[in-house]
Amino acid sequence: MFTASWTASPQRPSEGFTPNWSREGFWRQSLRQVVRLSAGGGRVRVRLSNAYGASPVRVAGASVGRTDEGAAVQPGSLTRLTFGGAGQVGIPARGQVVSDDVPLAVAAGDSVTVTLHFDAATGPATFHAQAFTTGYRGEGDLTAEPGGAGFDAASESWYFLSAVETDAGRADAVALFGDSITDGFGSTPGANRRWSDALAERTGRPVLNAGIGGNLLLNDSAWYGDKAVHRLRRDVLDHPGVDTLVVLLGLNDIGFSETDEQPTYKPAPVVEAEELIAGHRELIRQGRAAGLRVIGATLLPFGGSDHWGEHAAKVSHELNEWIRCSGEYDAVVDLNRAPADPADPDRLRPSYDFGDHLHPNDAGYEVMAEAVSTIL
C-alpha cells in the first residue's frame, strides 16, 4: 500500500512571488528537485502534474535518489524511474502521470532528489511557486549523474513534481490545507521548518502540505491558485493514505481588500463571514464524503499587517467564533489564540512574528504544530 509522503499543490505558470522558470519552461535540460519525505519505506514512486499545460509534456528520462549536498545525489542510490515499463513518458495536457515504483530505502525525514530530463520544449510549466527549497537546472541529460556539477542554475520553485509516495503501508496521513502560512512563508529557506515539517516530527505521522501562497477560499487567482473549494479533491482527496484534513483558510479572502500590495488580485471582493462559512461548509462536506476527519483551524492573529482593517477585524472575529463554537468541524484547533500576543490578542506574539505581522517565523510554526498535535 502506497502513501503520499510529500506533496506540492500545482499552480498556473506565472511570475509568482520570486523569479522562476515556469513561463519559459524547459528544453534540452535536466531539472533536479529536492523534497523531504514524511513517511519512509522500501519503494518510492513519483507523481508528475501538467494540470495547466495546453499540450502534452514529454519527459525523456527520470531518476530518483537520496539527497547529498546541493544538487548531488548520494552515490549508489541513484535509480532510474520508469512509466509503464518505459524510460520516457508524455504527461497529458491538463493531466498527470505516476511512475512505476522502484526500490529505494528511505526513512521519514529523509530528503530525496528527483531528476527530470526534457529533450523537447515543454512550453510553460505547471509548478508550485514557493518551495523554500532550492532546485537546480542543467543542460543536457543529467539523470544518471550523481554529482551536481552540471547544474548551473537554481530556483526556489518546484516544477511538474506534485507528489512522492512510498510503500509505507499507512493510512493515517494528515493533510494541511491552506495558504502561505501553510506553504511555509516566513520559515527559514532550506531548513524544512514549515509547520507541516514540525507536525510530522512531533507526531511521526505522514504530513502533506497542500498550501499555496495567496490562496483564497472562494475565488480563483492567476498567481495564487484555484479557489480552495475547487482544488481540494486534486490537492488532498486524490492522494493515497490521507485520513485527516486540517483547514486553515479565509485570511486572504478577508485581507486582500484591505491592502494595495496585491497587484495581481485587484479589485479584491469584500467578503462577509457568511460567505466564508459557506466555503468552510463545502470543504467539510467534501472531506467527510471522502471519509476524512475534518479539523477546523481558527485564523491566526494578523493585527498590524497589511491585511488588517476595520472590516477584516470584524469578519475574522466572526469566522473564528463560528469555527470554535458551531460544532460543524469534527474538531477545532485554536490557532488564533496559540501564537497570540498576550498584550494584544489581535497580534502575533513578537517572538513568533516573521516581521510582517501576518506570517509566523520558525518558532511560531512550532507552536502551531504543537497545538495541532494535541488533537490528532
Image: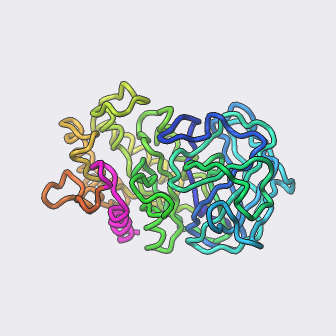
Residue 182 is left or right of residue 234, and the answer is left
Which quadrant would the N terminus be assigned to in this image? bottom right
> What percent of the width, then of the height, locates residue 219?
43, 33
Q: Position of residue 145 (x, y in %)?
A: 78, 61
When the figure is inspected, residue 193 is found, relative to residue 204, above or below; the finding is above
Picture residue at 52% right of the left edge, 43% below the top: 231
Quick check: 140 left or right of 234?
right
The picture quadrant where one finds residue 7 is bottom right
Q: Position of residue 64 (x, y in %)?
A: 72, 62
The residue at 48%/69% (across/down) is 200
Q: Residue furthest left?
A: 343
Find the residue positioned furthest to the right.
Answer: 86
Span colored in magenta = 354-376
Report whether 286 appears left or right of 318: right
Residue 374 in magenta stretch: yes
**Above or below, comparing residue 286 to residue 125 in the picture:** below
Compare residues 328 and 268 and report the one nearer the observer. Answer: 268
